Image: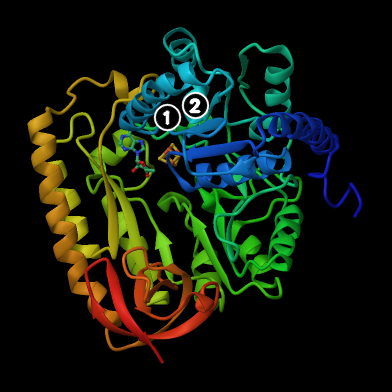
Amino acid sequence: MTNETHIELNNETEKQLEYMDLLNKIIREKASAKGRPLTACVVTFGCQMNERDSEKLKGILTRCGYELTDDETADLVLYNTCTVRENANLRLYGRLGHLSGMKKKDHDKIIGICGCMAQEPDVVKKLETSYPFTDIIFGTFNVYKLAEILYSHLTTGSRITDIWESNDTFTELLPTVRKYPFKSGVNIMYGCDNFCTYCIVPYVRGREKSRRPEDIIFEIEQLVKDGVTEVMLLGQNVNSYGKGLKAEVTFAELLRRVEKVVGLKRIRFMTSHPKDLSDELIEVMAASEKICDHIHLPLQSGSTEVLKRMNRKYTKEDYLALVEKIRKAMPDISITTDIIVGFPGESEADFEETLDVVRRVKFDSAYTFIYSKRTGTPAAAYEEQTDEATVKNRFDRLLKEIKNASSEVTGRYTGRTMPCLAESVNDHDPALITGRMSNNMLVHFPGDKSLVGKIVDVKITECKGFYYFGERV
Ligand code: 5AD
Ligand code: SF4
């Protein structure tokens, strides 16, 4: 391996591995003094980016000698936070309030906050003054520095706040602990340059930066050697992947290269911005054996006027035409979306336009959000914030419309045999396995845990709306 080919194995990576070794000694000493292993709990809020970051945090903590647990009574609790909507912030403060009691009883307990909320100066101020028992605070750009930050805290006894404004070094080759042994997220880019006017992500995740294709392929090859058969390529806007690289590469070209990784069976990606979805991407998807039959294509609003004020850079007609083009090339594809209700100034007529798109597109499923005002975003300053009762009424009507429209299409798989990746034993019934079809829908079917991680053929017997029942064939 040369540095030229894999620049991500850099000095920073080596430095962090050294901190992990140093911490490992300290943690082992503490464990032998306590007569039990030290435990760590990472709580994840928010999106798949955060899920992936948490796998990295868990990898570092494991290498430092911690035993992982889901129990917040652990010796170390780390909250990987989300701030995309205000609700997420409120949930964190609630959890922290609860922890303060535990910390009073156990002074050695370490409490950490990282992720998107930590990138907001007001939040950090509030944490430092109202939640003085927090021991380490770091942001989205230096996740890989957890061991160094923890080491500073343990050796000085003081609170460490380490927040960066940006970062140019990718540090992907550190240990991770994956939630599933057989599938993994892979960051292909970080940040976002789109500045949708409601969205805080560009402020807390910084400018868009793509990783080099050879580094991504190398990581995927390593994952496949480690038993992974499905990857989810992650970025805020994967369709603009490759901009700014020395040798510019399109997302479609990256997919062609990922497709060639021997042993990899399924490729997913998230999220696509409609304005950047190219014909080349549609061609590559249609021709591919491995790219799944699913595209998540956030609509946000069906009103061209609202879309303009959201700075989405497409019209209602553009979106409908794009869906038509995708369906023409891939008639069976499942299309899912995100929709925001109650954007400032959204009129009843604007909202009707959203309902119209839902009726016409018939999404397989949709995530719906009530607009949340985020300080510092342009939309927060817009007058005409919509009143709560109107928003609630529209939200309920939207849910109904989505359910009606999707029920017309999701039944199309009933009676068909579909390959499913068996992901886990069913939470409610241990005689069932929960698997995922290529279109991202869940199917429950009789089977035992030896199937987990395998792709098996399942005949779909019943559609339950947003999930299915089936039988192995
Ligand atoms: N209010 C409500 N929903 C939002 N989203 C992003 N920002 C906001 C906000 N301020 C939604 C968008 C995005 C999804 C991840 O979260 O629909 O696609
Ligand atoms: Fe936010 Fe828009 Fe970027 Fe998505 S594309 S992260 S909604 S600014």
Q: CA distance from mark 2 to mark 1?
A: 5 Å
Q: Amino acid at mark 1?
A: Ile
Percent position of residue 424, x then y: 46, 67
Q: Secondary structure at mark 2?
A: helix
Q: Residue at x 23, y 49 (%)?
A: 302
Q: Is residue 260 left or right of residue 460?
A: right
Residue on which disc 1 sits: 200
Q: Residue at x 24, y 76 (%)?
A: 463
Comparing 235 with 42, the one in front is 42
* Structural crowding at the residue carrying mark 2, measured as other residues with C-alpha within 10 Å and reported as few (<14), some (14–19) or many (≥20): some
Q: Secondary structure at mark 1?
A: loop
Percent position of residue 66, x then y: 66, 39
Quarter holding the C terminus? bottom left
The reply to whether residue 467 is in sight is yes
Residue on which disc 2 sits: 203
Q: Quadrant of residue 82?
A: top left
